[in-house]
Each structure stands twice: as C-alpha cells, then as structure tokens.
Image: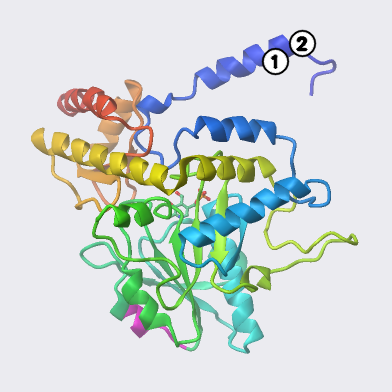
C-alpha cells in the first residue's frame, strides 16, 4: 500500500484509464453478461453501501431481496417456493447440490459415494462443486441434438444418486434440455432434480410466450426441485446477481448455518457479507421492465440472432447446430487463429476447447443489427487473411 494517499482526482484518472481499456460492449460477441440496464446501475450505486449479511441494519434492502425472490419464484411458476439471491450461477448451483446432498442425508439416503447424473455439456461450475462437496459425477453423453437424453437419465439413476442436473440454456450452445421429459423420469425416484437455467432463465419463459418451440423447464414440470436463474446475465442486473430457487417453502433453509449473534438469522448462502446493490439493481430492472419489457427484449434478441444467422449463411458459413436460443456456433477452419485476428481488430468471440474448429457468437442484449453489419465484413476479411 502507498505510504500516503493519492488525491482523488489522480485515483479517478488512473482507474478511468484502466476502464477505458476494457472492450466496449459493441465489440463483445462472446459474453452471456451484458451492459446492465441504466436504472439498475443507478440504483446499485445508491445501494453500494448495503450488506445483506446484516439484516438488522439493512432491513429495507432485505425486504427488496425477499421481493426479488418472490418475483423470480413467480416467473418460474412457483409462488409458494423459497430461495435466496447469491453471487451468480456457480454459487446457486453449489447451494442446490448442497441442499440435495443434505436432504438425502436427512432421509437416510446418503451413501458413501453420492453421485450426480449430469450431461457431458453441463457447465464447468459443477466440476468445482463436485470437488467441494465430495460428489461423483455420472456423465451422460448428449444426444445428436446436444441434449441430455431422458432415457439415459432413467438408466443411470441408482442407489448412490442424490441429484440429476438438467440445463436450460447450455453455455456453449444455448441448448435447452428436455426438462419436461427428464422431470417425470426423476419424479418418484427420491432424487433431487436441479435445473441450471443460469443462461436461459430470463429468455425461455418469454420466448415460449412469443411462440418459440422450447421445452418447459420450470417448477410446473413434475419433479423439478430447484432452479438456478441469473439476473446478471439476461436479466440486465449488475454483477454479482444470481438466484437459487426451490420448490418447497422450507427448502432454501435446508442448508442453514447459524451466526453468533441474537436476532441475526441463519445464513442460507455461501457468502456472509453479500452485496445488497445486486438485489436492488435486480429489483429495479424487474419492476421497470415487467413481463412486457422482457418479452420485447427477447423478441429483439431472437430477431438479431436470426439476422446474424442469415448473414453468416449468406457468406457461406455452416452452423455447428441450429440455435435454440441466442448462441450461434459456426464451423470455422482455423477458428483459434481467426478469433485471435478478430481480437486484434477489437472484436471478442469464443472458440471451443471441446468441439473442434468452431466460433461461438452470443447475441445478448447489447448486440444490434448494426453491430452484426459491422462484424460480418471483419469476419470475412479475417477468414481470408
Ligand atoms: N451455469 C450456466 C449454464 C452458465 O452459463 C454459467 C455461466 O455462464 C454458470 C452456470 C456460472 O455462472 P456464474 O459465472 O455467474 O457463476
């Protein structure tokens, strides 16, 4: 640390210089996070000092958190459930599997080798979680449509299984598992079904309302016990805003750790000190946009995705898979070199470590047709270099 402090103007200038080097959103085609809504940013800044870990001080902020959880439960078709706001998809998935493991223990169902059935495209956050919780993954290869096959799930559930994880919007492809088929297979087997909708939670409900043919994935599906949904992705809230939701009114409390002090409630989340600003930002955006606003955003999102797909096809590119949501994966010889060339020209895309020569383009809320029009010629030049 410096021996004596620098003037605020100096600190501001140096931070502004670093921030200016971050890639502007209009050059970002790889991120599931997007530019937060201006009202969310404004309200997060008003709540920058708040801490949801201390509910006696921040009682108004806590009320906002409870309201956000209710709004999200309502969106996921289960107003009577329970849940918590957390730091993001990783923490939400962790808490879901912790609750699954502890519920199995409470029912005398926990063996010496607890297993979780997952697909080969499940998000890598689960690799961290399996290590932390001492769970063994039973990995089911995805089918030709890149989905977790319900029949295989049924076959792999055994005496050690404590949970099955389905994904509603995979990170790599935006593919939605057939949760409506997996749910009935898991229901009645005394196994927790968790749906990781970190990516799709703020898209699929609205896309279904708009008539897109996507499977139902929420609590209306028999067997679904918990859902991860991330306001800091397509919910337009500030990072770090995630949520874990449970079917039962008491389920969120099944992982509960007491604090030292009287009148301080138990903690249901991994983090102790937690940013109230993220809850406030999420509340502001949900209230301001409402279902209509999110439906409009989703309509635009699908239109821009189609615009990009049409442009790519017109330029002769082949897609790796037909996009279900707003993630477009293109077959691309020399993908890594092309991605590096694009980055040298200011554009950020992803290339897969697991699926060969492909470019992954994410059409999130900040991607516009004008941006696609700028990008495609740069891609063509990079392909020819
Ligand atoms: N699950 C899915 C499907 C994701 O796409 C992601 C992140 O992209 C995560 C979990 C992890 O979320 P976070 O990075 O917010 O911890």
Q: Residue at x 68, y 69 (%)?
A: 253
At a point 46% along the width and 54% down the height, the residue shown is: 198
Question: Which corner quadrant of the image does residue 1 belong to?
Answer: top right
Q: Quadrant of the C terminus?
A: top left
Q: Position of residue 276 (x, y in %)?
A: 68, 44
Mark 1 vs ligand 1: CB under 8 Å?
Answer: no
Depth check: give the residue in front, 217 or 185: 217
Q: Nearer the viewer, residue 130 or 287?
A: 287
Q: Taking 56 as reference, is 32 above or below it?
A: above
Residue that numbered label 2 is attached to: 7
Rendering coords of residue 49 (x, y %) = 75, 36
- On whether residue 153 falls in the magenta region, the answer is yes
**Mark 2 vs 1: CB contact within 8 A:** yes
Q: Which mark is residue 11?
A: 1
* Res 109 label: none
Question: What residue do we see at 64% from left, 83% from top?
Answer: 105
Farthest residue, direction right:
262
Q: Magenta residues, as a range?
A: 152-158
């Amino acid at each position: 640390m410096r021996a004596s402090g620098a003037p605020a103007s100096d600190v501001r200038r140096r931070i502004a210089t670093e921030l200016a080097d971050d890639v502007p959103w209009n050059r970002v085609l790889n991120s599931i996070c997007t530019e937060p809504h201006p009202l969310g940013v404004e309200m997060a800044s008003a709540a920058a000092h708040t801490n949801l870990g201390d509910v006696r001080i921040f009682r108004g902020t806590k009320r906002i958190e409870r309201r956000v959880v209710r709004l999200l439960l309502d969106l996921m078709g289960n107003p009577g459930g329970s849940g918590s706001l957390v730091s993001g998809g990783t923490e939400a998935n962790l808490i879901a599997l912790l609750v699954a493991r502890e519920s199995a223990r409470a029912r005398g169902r926990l063996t010496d080798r607890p297993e979780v059935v997952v697909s080969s495209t499940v998000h890598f956050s689960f690799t961290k979680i399996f290590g932390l919780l001492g769970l063994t993954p039973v990995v089911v290869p995805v089918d030709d449509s890149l989905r977790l096959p319900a029949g295989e799930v049924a076959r792999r559930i055994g005496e050690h299984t404590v949970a099955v994880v389905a994904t509603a919007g995979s990170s790599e492809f935006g593919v939605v598992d057939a949760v409506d088929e997996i749910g009935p297979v898991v229901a009645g087997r005394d196994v927790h079904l968790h749906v990781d909708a970190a990516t799709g939670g703020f898209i699929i409900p609205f896309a279904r309302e708009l008539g897109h043919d996507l499977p139902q994935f929420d609590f209306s599906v028999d067997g679904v016990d918990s859902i991860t949904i991330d306001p800091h992705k397509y919910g337009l809230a500030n990072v770090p805003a995630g949520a874990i939701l449970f079917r039962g009114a008491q389920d969120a409390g099944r992982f509960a750790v007491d604090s030292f002090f009287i009148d301080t409630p138990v903690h249901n989340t991994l983090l102790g000190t937690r940013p109230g600003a993220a809850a406030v930002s999420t509340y502001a955006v949900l209230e301001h946009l409402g279902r209509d606003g999110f439906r409009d955003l989703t309509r635009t999102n699908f239109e821009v995705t189609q615009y990009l797909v049409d442009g790519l096809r017109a330029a002769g590119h082949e897609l790796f898979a037909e996009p279900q949501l707003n993630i477009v994966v293109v077959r691309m010889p020399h993908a890594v070199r092309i991605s590096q060339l694009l980055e040298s020209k200011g554009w950020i895309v992803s290339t897969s470590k697991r699926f060969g020569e492909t470019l992954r383009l994410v059409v999130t809320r900040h991607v516009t047709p004008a941006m696609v029009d700028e990008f495609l010629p740069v891609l063509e030049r990079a392909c020819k270099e």
